[in-house]
Image (cartoon, helix red, strand yellow):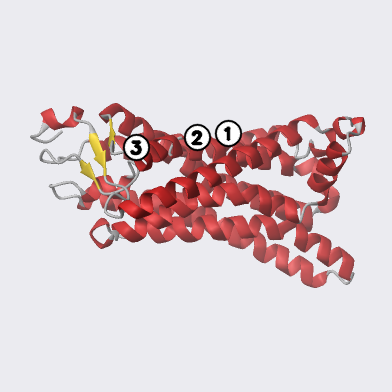
Amino acid sequence: MGNDNNSYQQAFILLGFSDHPRLEIILFAFVLVFYILTLVGNTAIILLSIMDARLHTPMYFFLGNLSFLDLCFTTSIVPQLLWNLWGPEKTISYHGCVAQLYIYMVLGSTECVLLAVMSYDRYVAVCQPLHYTVVMHPCLCLQLVTVSWFCGFLNSFIMCPQTMQLSRCGCNTVDHFLCEMPALIAMSCEDTMFVEAFAFALGVALLLVPLSLILISYGMIAATLLKIKSATGCKKAFNTCSSHLTVVSLFYGTIIYMYLQPANSYSQDQGKFLTLFYTIISPSINPLIYTLRNKDVKGVIKRLLRGEKGAWEA
């Protein structure tokens, strides 16, 4: 546990954007708006996927889980961030920091695997359409989601204790707006090579492996699309996958850049804005990305706005 056991229960000071005081008010409004969009958009997708029988399919089951993840992921960060941006108080209790780190890592890791699961669902839908309902049966869908959550909890329960047990020599100032693993590792006063190596290995397992599976799935989808002679069929298949591919690009692009690099090369200012993007902006635009090209969801929303009872019937 190190020689500074007394410092482990100290409250942490989250510096956040305190070195840019004029920016804090702007960021407060910015974060609040995107948080409201996240709450409204993701809650709407969850309710629609539950209440409308037309959306009781594997694709919307996974999409509902993704929206639930995004809701929890953002909510574990934004209230504390808004509190720190609004006033002079920048502290978070030790146990609050630990809880935020655990929840943040569980949900972030789970989303990495879930996006790979969703790419497999799209692969079956495009490449094996006649066998889709047989292959993607409810039991398999539930198992795939359970595996995603298991991987998230496993990663968090391995890395969080190692991160929090690092000796900090009395330092309790985190140069970030949340208790994030790279920032907590960077503030340690002991050799962190082992922890960084372990974090890198788990990062490869939870980032590059799912991403490889996603790329393989979309490679096979692309090969199938090239064989489709019908322009309408090709366009329909492309629209089916483009939303998910956009979300994958936004999420994995920032995550891989941040987590697969040594802590000593970690730029805090750059890291703060990248974290702001994938924890607040990305979850708020995901519902928009999925609904813009989705006729089913748009159809349900239109029927709901018109007040048709059939919107909630099979």
Q: Earlier in the sequence, mark 2 or mark 3?
A: 2
Quadrant for the N terminus in the image = top left
Gap between marks 2 and 3 measured at Cα: 12 Å
Name the residue that disc number 3 marks.
158
Instruction: Please count the marks in the image.
Output: 3
Name the residue that disc number 2 marks.
150
Residue type, label 2: Phe
Q: Position of residue 284 (x, y in %)?
A: 58, 47
Give neighbour class at mark 1: few <14, some 14-19, many 20+ (Cα, 10 Å).
some
Gap between marks 1 and 3 measured at Cα: 18 Å
Give neighbour class at mark 3: few <14, some 14-19, many 20+ (Cα, 10 Å).
few
Residue type, label 3: Ile
Residue type, label 1: Thr
Contact? badges 2 and 3 (CB < 8 Å) = no
Q: Earlier in the sequence, mark 1 or mark 3?
A: 1
In the displayed structure image, the side of residue 254 where residue 237 appears, left or right: right
Secondary-structure class at tag 2: helix
Secondary-structure class at tag 3: helix
Name the residue that disc number 1 marks.
146
**Residue 284 seen anywhere in this rendered image of the structure:** yes
Quadrant for the C terminus in the image = top right
Work out whether residue 250 or residue 300 is closer to the camera in this orientation and state it. Answer: 300
In the displayed structure image, the side of residue 11 where residue 216 appears, left or right: right
**Residue 259 seen anywhere in this rendered image of the structure:** no
**Residue at horizontal 10 percent and vertical 34 percent from the top:** 4
Work out whether residue 28 or residue 302 is closer to the camera in this orientation and state it. Answer: 28
**Residue at horizontal 10 percent and vertical 40 percent from the top:** 169
Q: Is residue 138 above or below residue 253?
A: above
Q: Position of residue 293 (x, y in %)?
A: 76, 56
Contact? badges 1 and 2 (CB < 8 Å) = yes
Secondary-structure class at tag 1: helix
